[in-house]
Image (spheres, helix red, strand yellow):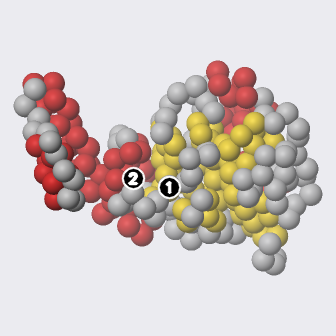
Amino acid sequence: MSTGFQILKRSRIASAELVAAFSALPVANVSDAMCRMTAGGAALRPMHRSSTMAGVAVTVKTRPGDNLMVHKAINMSGAGDIIVVDAGGDLTNALIGELMLAYAIKRGIEGIVINGAIRDSGFIRKENFPVYAAGITHRGPLKDGPGEINIPIAISGMVIEPGDIIIGDDDGFLAVPYHDAENILQLSQKKYEAEKKLVQAIEKGTNDRSWVDKALLDKGCVLE
């Protein structure tokens, strides 16, 4: 094996209990708990009909337009896994379509994230199987390699390591680092509960909005 063309095993995997706990939270709350410093980029949008996503990362780095390693990742993955592919954001060739997704669904894979293009978008839009991608094209892929599986990758500055927790909803997807997942979970749950109380206050008409004018005055804004 050599760098650029290798398939590795994950050295650690987030627990199913942690994944389940994150699956109950909005991605926005988790993002806030991570100081709003981490995101997979606004370009990667949900292509499926509607559903949340939560699982453990199987990472793929591939040459733009080539899906040989994506095929291998699907063969390697199963229940609880989410395949995350860094294809450089190139939209020239689609890396997945209906046939590959049908096989991924059959294997129990929890979702696929592609920093690149997909095709058979009509099929994907009818399904609840989570697919996030940067774009759509009818032109199919190459199958020559090279590529790597289960190495650290980065999408729009967000580092994703094999075994990290991957979550997604209508707002997009997010990687939660394995080494800090429990702390992030606690902060996210507190944020979620705080927002639930705020919604209740809004419904009752008791929410305090005085902070808006205070913030403006503190920054030197003139209020007439």
- Using the rendered view, name the quadrant where residue 156 is placed: bottom right
Label 1, label 2: how many angstroms apart (C-alpha)? 8 Å
* Residue 58: image tag: none
| Residue with the mark numbered 1 | 39
Q: Is residue 35 visible?
A: yes
Quarter of the rendering occupied by the N terminus: bottom right
For this rendering, which residue is in front, 22 or 188?
A: 188
Q: Which mark is on residue 31?
A: 2
Disc 1, disc 2: CB below 8 Å? yes
Quarter location, residue 148: bottom right
Q: Position of residue 37 (x, y in %)?
A: 43, 61
Q: Is residue 220 above or below residue 109?
A: below
Q: Which residue is more in the foreground, 74 or 28?
A: 28
Amino acid at the residue labelled 2? Ser
The image position of residue 159, as x and y in percent, is 55, 65
Q: Residues within 10 Å of mark 1 (few under 14, many from 20)?
A: some
Hey, which residue is sitting farthest left in the picture? 206
Q: Residue at x 88, y 38 (%)?
A: 139
Q: Does dot 2 land on a helix, a strand or a loop?
A: helix
| Horizontal side of residue 121 vs 113, given as left or right | right
Residue drawn 58% across the image and 25% down it: 49
Please state, as top left, top right, bottom left or bottom right, where the C terminus lies in the image: top left
Closer to the chain start, of discs 1 and 2, is 2
Question: Compared with residue 198, is residue 127 higher up or lower down, i.e. above or below?
Answer: above
For badge 1, the amino acid type reads Ala
Residue at screen point 16% across, 59% down: 218
Residue ID at (50%, 60%): 164
Residue 124 locus on image (x, y percent): 68, 28
